[in-house]
Amino acid sequence: MFNGILNVRKEKGFTSHDVVAKLRGILRQKKIGHTGTLDPAAEGVLPVCLGSATKLVEFLTDRSKTYRASLLLGVETDSQDMTGTVLTTREVLCDEKALRAAAQCFVGGYDQIPPMYSAKKQGGKKLVDLARQGITVERQARRVDITDIRFEEIALPRAVMTVECGKGTYIRTLCHDIGEKLGCGGAMEALLRTRVGSFRLEDAYTLSELEAAMQAGEIEDKLVSIEDCLALYPARKALPEADAGLKNGNAVPESAIAAASDSEGALVRLYLSKGAFVGLFQKRGGRYWAEKMFLERGAD
């Protein structure tokens, strides 16, 4: 079984679940999970976790992301992108300066209402399933973090922008909301995810490339290890007396960790005294508690 993370370049026409299903066939293993939904019409970076790395799905889902989005002003659709039904069209009277100013209103974060055409669940049902039945329900706005919006091209009524944001941000809703701010409506024409955390588009592989690597016996060369994926967390080594407890996933006192000077709530990569990687631990109340264990049996 393969353990690690594949940086997949999802192509248009595939759902995130399609990517997982195809990889299960290519790699001939079932334990695979993706780290965040991309719409079928969108493309770009989709980190996929294999084997024991599936424990990292929630950590990767929380990472910041970068998107390149094409915005079309003057149109509003039911899906907030151009795959949906056009509801209204309006004249675009704004200029480039007004567009930039409107977009900046959303930088720093805002309360975003999830679109009906989304995988988000409400009352145990996916909003998209309700939308396809012609049902619209009231959705609660949730805070999303928009770090930056930069316009790469502007040729009104179209514009291309790069958006850096946190988890849970719907870029097509951002396009819709910018259009509403300008009073003319807006929808997303295309979306390319260029980064998820440290995973970047230039290092991503298509499914056909991964299939070829598998056939050539080179798939492990494409894997990012669990330790490398967690490299943003500081590494700490246990003293010999703490090894037995750590192997069982027990919490250990700060005094049993060499050179420990972490603040309360800090996450660290913890290693046994002889060097084997144990997992991700969090410091709470003067002790280090296991968040995710990755230690192989018999390791020392």
Image (cartoon, helix red, strand yellow):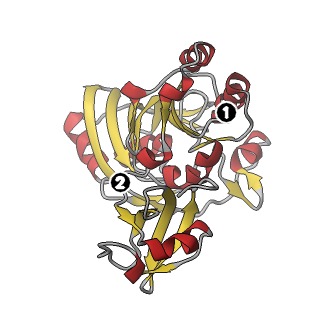
Location of residue 247 by image quarter: bottom right
Q: Residue at x 56, y 44 (%)?
A: 36
Tell me residue 20's x, y (percent).
67, 33
Which one is nearer the viewer's eye here, 23 or 228?
228
Amino acid type for the residue under numbered disc 1: Val
Amino acid type for the residue under numbered disc 2: Leu
Q: Residue at x 76, y 62 (%)?
A: 123
Cα separation between marks 1 and 2: 26 Å
Local SS, label 2? loop
Residue 58 higher or lower than 140, as above or below: above
Residue 20 bears which disc, if any? 1
Residue 50 higher or lower than 111, as above or below: above
Q: Residues within 10 Å of mark 1 (few under 14, many from 20)?
A: some
Local SS, label 1? helix
Badge 2 is on which residue?
A: 232
Which image quarter is the N terminus in? Answer: top right
Residue 155 bears which disc, if any? none
For the residues labelled 1 and 2, say whether their Cβ atoms are less than 8 Å apart. no
Which callout, 1 or 2, points at the residue further toward the start of the chain?
1
Tell me residue 79's x, y (percent).
60, 38
Tell me residue 248's x, y (percent).
62, 69
Residue 164 higher or lower than 137, as above or below: above
Which one is nearer the viewer's eye here, 151 or 166?
166
- On screen, residue 30 versus residue 164, left or right, reads right
